Amino acid sequence: MKQACAVVLAVCGVLVLGAWALAEPSPWPPKPNIIFILADDLGYGDLGCYGQRVLRTPHLDRMAQEGMRFTQFYAGCTVCAPSRCVLMTGLHMGHCYIRGNAKMNLRPEDLTVAEVLQQAGYATALIGKWGLGHEGSTGVPNRQGFDYFFGYLDQHHAHNYFPTFLLRNQQRVRLPNVVPNEDRYGGGVATVRRVYSPELMIQEALQFIEKNKDRPFFLYFAPTLPHANNEARQRGMEVPDYGPWKNRNWPEPEKGFAAMVSLLDRHVGMILDRLRQLGIHRRTLVIFSSDNGPHQEGGHRADFFDSNGPLRGIKRDLYEGGIRVPTIAWWPGVVPQGTVCDHVAYFGDFFATATELAGVECPPGLDSISFVPSLFGQNHKQKRHEYLYWEFYERGGAQAVRAGRWKLVRKPWQADAPVELYDLENDLGEQHNLARQHPEVVKRLLGYMQEAHRPHPQWKVRPRRPRPRKPTRR
């Protein structure tokens, strides 16, 4: 299937480029560089430009001032692996292959945005966390469109900020950290901490940019910050030091979380600065986002810094706080400076956006609409989804759909389960269930849920059974 797609894409690319040559001049240079930076478990309210009052994020705030801040941009899911699957494949949760956090691998027939850009002549790299394929499988990045990979394949391995190894392409690179009782994937808690993985990853990212400054490139930079090392339990916010937060009268995990956000912010600043230094910033689109809502793990409390801002819910919820994510687009001279965009988009739309910028046709059958018009401030040209859809398989299962102002949530995922309907224009915090007042809207959105879900042999809803009560002593 991938070979057939390559032929179709090549033909479509010629047609698209030919049409482009006859049309009005494009507002962007041919084959611009594309960088997608994906934070891990960063909340909608964790950045200064989204209302954060304690944590300091000067580089990301400047990125928003120089570019565009999206206010209604959604992750692919409320947990890591499926959200990243949606981002890479342009298929929403009802259609994509990996729909939960599990030891699963993308298949040869799964087409990624990296493959299409690779076929269009881009140098492609993933640096950071993958989560969609394990060693020796068909899902490793080098078999899914990436010329170069450095980082973590397995999600549990990625919990560990001081691992004994990382992967470069398909080879393990040994590190001088010591992790007793390390699992087969590299997960665990280090007792000797010499090398901090985020510092290696930012250097790899900068080297890739430098090496490919004279040709089109796609960099998917996916640091693990500020995810927790869950295996470390209440000491899971692993950092070399607390930096400017060390003297705060806060619990240790909160100092660690703050230090992680500060480091993430600094690394984004280093990428933007390097693009300027190389003189390629005006032909490079940089998008920053997060894979889902804020976590409450490793001893960190999501409400300590008000990480979800005005939204309800956190990671593993299908309320807005679990799936609406901070998203910033930066492209000096192209993306209007200091703008705010309220276009409703999600991770799956990156596929169509990237292919349009690269001058090739987006493959058919995807759940992807390009948001290039929004990037250029041309809202009158922007196509919109009839609805967005999510499903989740933990905690008895849940579904959510958004259509215009309306949001419907159903949990547990059962045909006769009660539903919750929210008017996001007037109730951003999802506090008032209007299902009884608007039965016709409920019926329409339930129809979307049924339409969007395609059964998957490995992902089936298993409602939680109530725990048996312990006998009462008399």
Image: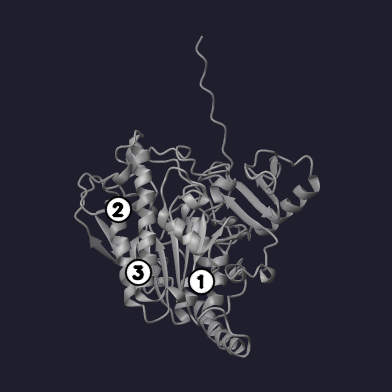
Q: Which residue is mark 1?
A: 111
Give the residue number, with chain letter if any, for mark 2: 186
Q: Residue at x 50, y 60 (%)?
A: 65
Q: Quadrant of residue 121?
A: bottom left
- Residue flagged by tag 2: what amino acid is it? Gly
Name the residue at the top extreme. Answer: 474
Q: Real-space Cα distance between discs 2 and 3?
A: 32 Å
Residue topped by disc 3: 274
Q: Earlier in the sequence, mark 3 or mark 1?
A: 1
Q: Earlier in the sequence, mark 2 or mark 3?
A: 2
Apparent side of residue 327 relative to residue 279 in the rendered image (left or right)? right
Give the residue type that dot 1 points to: Leu
Q: Residue at x 58, y 79 (%)?
A: 361
Task: Estimate the x, y position of residue 349 in percent, counting from the top left.
Answer: 58, 66
Report if the CB atoms under discs 2 and 1 are less than 8 Å apart. Answer: no
Proximity of marks 2 and 3: CB atoms separated by less than 8 Å: no
Type of amino acid under label 3:
Arg
Numbered circle sitting on residue 306: none
Residue 9 makes an appearance in the image: yes
Residue drawn at x 51%, y 78% is 358
227 and 281: which one is in front?
Answer: 281
Residue 427 position in % (x across, y down): 67, 43
Please say if the residues under marks 3 and 1 sit with CB atoms less than 8 Å apart.
Answer: no
Marks 2 and 1, how far apart in space? 28 Å
Choose between 354 and 90: the one closer to the eye. Answer: 354
Q: Nearer the viewer, residue 246 or 179?
A: 246
